[in-house]
Amino acid sequence: MAVVNEDIASIFNKVAAFYEIKGENPFKVRAYRNAARTIQNLGTNIVDMLSQGQDLKELPGIGKDLEHDIREIVATGRLKKLENLERSIPPALIELLAIEGLGPKKVKALHERLNITSLDDLKEAAKSGAIEALPGFGKKSVEQILKGIMLAKKEGRRFRWAIAELYANDLLDYLGRIKGIENLVVAGSFRRKKDTVGDLDILATAKNWDVITEHFVRFDKVKFVVSKGSTRSTIVLKNDLQVDLRSVAVENYGSALSYFTGSKAHNIAVRKIAVERGLKINEYGVFKGERRIAGKTEEEVYGSIGLPYIEPELREDRGEIEAAGTGRLPRLIELRDLKGDLHCHTTYTDGKNTLEEMARASLELGHEYIAITDHSKRLTVARGLDEKRLRQQIEEIDRLNQKIKGLTILKGIEVDILEDGTLDLPDSVLKELDLVVGAIHYKFKLSREAQTKRMIKAMDNPYLNILAHPTGRLIGERESYEVNIEEVLDAARERGCFLELNSQPDRLDLNDVNCRLAKEMGIKISISTDAHNTFSLNYQRYGINQARRGWLEKADVVNARGLDELKYILKRR
């Protein structure tokens, strides 16, 4: 199997971390970290780019040496440079780098001064007071470390959906090469598009099951084989992702797919209705006594209890069965419904592509418009725009709108929401823009009351249109801010503000529950990418996954509207 982008990015991130622990040149550390980010953000597999003869040095931050490293990883699945580094550093230290607030320098200090090499060591030292006594640490650092340990243990071995998708696609491609295999599909939480996935459940109908099983367990990313049986085989991949392959009969394929897609709560609710009708539903079909009456398709299964087909993303027992029974199921939004992107960055700040390159990439995706929303001045690490540079960008957008046909570039800004809730740029320049996206980039640890008040005050500004990544979470890395989301949504509705569903696969913020709540309150959502390069413009599909789980329809999404209607609703009234 070909190496996937996440493999390369993971190796580069480890190289960067080990270099930093060893005290290497910070430019070298930054080069590997930036390259990892570029590769993770690619909208296409880097192996395919190489096979097509593309020059990887055209990618942002990829030079000759890094291209050589990529080619080595693609060819061998390994990087000798990393293996040499691993031999010089206790490998257990990499586990500590996953804790929020612990960078490589602090990990190095903890290891050298307290001989900490594991999460258990870290927890014991934090509770004993040993860490608080170290220079550069303190009470707040210890509190953050303990919270980070809890988060790491709570997440367990779960994978972001976008990462699981890479392995799922490769497995489907690998298995699909065998003749005689049919109806190959990944079920479970992956099919329901949950933001994280614990394992992969693959279902298949096939006659030559022995051949397929042997092929499956020889998959070249297998760490070990758990079991190999007549109807089910289980492997664990080298990244610790468990994969089950199940053989199902054609006549009960639909009932098996429904059963293994879940969720458990949804399945229980379905079976309860079946019992009330004198039926039994399980993975083998729908039965009236001993007679199978349905099960070949999912439509048959739902039809047997008087319900229409329910989309997998809705199957969480959150009212979807009642909605199906009364004809009120939502017509879920699709990727093709989106007309543009309302949160993107360029080389004016921390983006990797020019304004024109971002616009032309958006045009190739079939968009009608793209909003350029670079950072404001407070975010100095991203070279945020002050009034003068923002006006220079406005002038360039005017010129490009004359030059590029078929696409409108909207003038915007991702303005920092300051600690007191005011915005980072004056109204005198904000009023010149087509839209303003507000975001929190610092002071994440304010109290629930203070953070909520901060967001609401920001929305008091009549020029703020969209609240970006509203809860601030990073999946598996950082929990949401302490904020009263109901109060924020209430304030957004009263002020005519929209909320963003950030499509970055490590954010997906708003989550599905809050998307549903916003919909019920009549608040519109922007499904945007927060793209920092042209490849990331493809991330809207991850946002669509989340939107569908949140019951969103086309009418609930602002950037599913044409340009004229969008401009109209952006004017707060």
Image (cartoon, grey):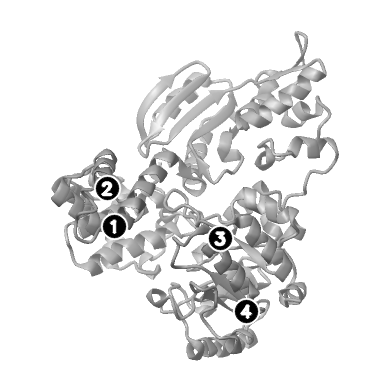
Q: Is residue 560 left or right of residue 94?
A: right
The answer to whether one can see residue 102 in this image is no
Tally of numbered tags: 4
Where residue 237 appears, as percent x and y from the top left, is 39, 35
Is 426 or 429 nearer to us in this picture? 426
**CA gap, disc 4 and disc 1:** 38 Å
Q: Earlier in the sequence, mark 3 or mark 4?
A: 4
The C terminus, quarter of image: bottom right
Callout 4, which amino acid? Ile
The Cα–Cα distance between marks 3 and 2, rounded to whole angstroms, is: 31 Å
Residue drawn at the location 49% of the way across and 91% of the way down:
388
Question: For numbered disc 2, what is the local secondary structure?
Answer: helix
Res 225 quadrant in image: top left
Q: Position of residue 513 (x, y in %)?
A: 63, 48
Q: Which mark is residue 94?
A: 2
* CB under 8 Å between discs 4 and 1: no
Closest to the observer, 323 or 531: 323
Residue 538 image label = 3
Mark in the foreground, 1 or 3: 1
Depicted 36 relative to depicted 148: above or below: below
Q: Mark 4 or mark 1, which has the lower sequence index?
A: 1
Q: Earlier in the sequence, mark 1 or mark 3?
A: 1
- The quadrant of the rendering that contains the N terminus is top left
Q: Earlier in the sequence, mark 2 or mark 1?
A: 2
In front of the other: 59 or 140? 140
* Comparing labels 2 and 1, the label whose residue is closer to the camera: 1
The disc label shown at residue 278, or none = none
Task: Tell me, yes or no, whether the two marked residues, 3 and 4, touch with CB atoms within 8 Å.
Answer: no
Q: Nearer the viewer, mark 3 or mark 2?
A: 2
Q: Nearer the viewer, residue 445 or 439?
A: 445
The image's mark for residue 409 is: 4
